[in-house]
Amino acid sequence: MAPSAAAGSAPVPEIAAPRRAATAPPILPLAVRGLGYSADGASLVSDLNLDIADTRVHVLVGPNGAGKSLTLRLLHGLLAPTAGTIRWNGAPPDRRVRLRQAMVFQKPVLLRRSVLANLTYALRAHGVPRRERHQRARAVLDAAGLSAVAGRAARVLSGGEQQRLAVARAWAVHPEVLFLDEPTANLDPAATRMVEDMIAAIRDQGTAIVLATHDMGQARRLGEEVLFLHRGRLRERSDAAAFFAGPQSPAGRAYLAGRLLA
C-alpha cells in the first residue's frame, strides 16, 4: 500500500475516482523489450527489459547519468527508441496511450494561463465534456491545496505551488500511468511532503506511478518496487523493502553505501 499522509500534515482530500469508458481496454501491462537509445555515437540506454502490470509505486533509482530521466521520456513517448520495443497491452504506442498517461518534470511546464485554466485546458485536450471540466478542476485544486490561488497566473506561484499544480494537472486527467521525474528535487521539506501526499493519493485511486528520484528517503516512503539503473542498464528489480534491506547486485550495494559513481 502507498503511505498515508506524513505526520502533522492534513490528509489529501479524495477526488472522484477515474472513470474509464466501458469499451476502452486498459493500456497496462507495459512490456519493454531490448530498449535502447543512442545519441552522437554513445549508448545511453541499452538492453532494457521491463514489465509493469500493476498500480504500485515503482521507484527508479541510480546515480547521475544512469539513464533515469531518459528512460521515463522513452516510456512516455517523448523520444523514439533507437532499439527495442515498447508495448502497451500488446500494442505499440499511439494517441490512445498518450492520452491515458501523464508525466511531470523536475521543472514544471506551465501554460501562460491561470491556475484553473491550466487544468481546464488539459481536460479539454483529453476530451472531457465542458460541463465536467470546472467541477473536476476545482476538486483537484482543492485536493492540492490550491483553491485559493485558482485565479492567479500559474507562472507567478512559488516553486512548491507550481509543482503541486503540475501534479494536480496530471491528476485531473485521470491517467492510468503517471511518470514523475524528480518532482521534489528543488522543494523544501514542507512542499516535498505535500507533493508526496498527492502522489500517494493518486496511486490509491488506481494509477500506476513510475517515479525517478535521487532522494532515498522519498524512495523508502513511497516506493513499493525498486528499479535500479546504472550506466543505462536495469541492474536490479525487487520489492522496495528487500532492496533497501540488502540489494542483490554489487552495484546496488555500492549505490546505497554511497560508493557508486556514474
Image: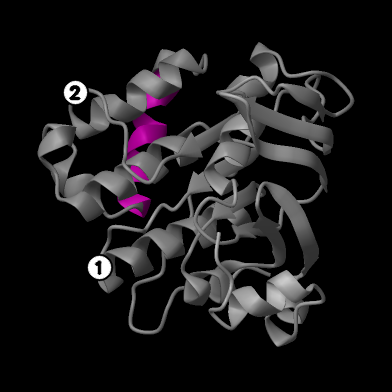
Q: Nearer the viewer, residue 53 or 31?
A: 31
In the rendered structure, the answer to whether residue 152 lies left or right of residue 39 reads left
Q: In which quarter of the image is residue 246?
A: bottom right
Q: Which amino acid does label 2 sit on?
A: Arg
Quadrant that contains the C terminus = bottom right
User: What is the crowding at mark 2: few (fewer than 14 residues within 10 Å), some, or many (at least 20)?
Assistant: some
Residue 13 in view: no
The colour style of the image is: one colour
Q: Residue at x 40, y 15 (%)?
A: 130
Return the disc, 1 or 2, that comes first in the chain's sequence.
2
In the rendered structure, the answer to whether residue 101 lies left or right of residue 107 reads right
In the displayed orientation, state which residue is furthest to the front. Answer: 41
SS label for mark 1? loop
Q: Residue at x 51, y 47 (%)?
A: 180
Examine the residues drawn in magenta and state their main secondary structure: helix
User: What is the crowding at mark 1: few (fewer than 14 residues within 10 Å), some, or many (at least 20)?
Assistant: few
User: How many discs appear?
Assistant: 2
> Marks 2 and 1: in contact by CB < 8 Å?
no
Residue 28 in view: yes
Is label 1 or label 2 in front?
A: 1
Whole-percent x, y for residue 35 in the image? 78, 33
Whole-percent x, y for residue 94 in the image? 70, 14
Q: Residue at x 59, y 46 (%)?
A: 67
Q: What residue type is labelled 1?
A: Asp
Q: Give the range drawn in magenta.
A: 131-143
Q: What label sits on residue 161 in the rendered view? A: none
**Residue that numbered label 1 is attached to:** 188
Q: Does the magenta stretch include residue 113?
A: no
**Residue that numbered label 2 is attached to:** 113
Q: Which residue is drawn at 45% across and 14% down?
A: 125
3D distance between C-alphas at marks 1 and 2: 25 Å
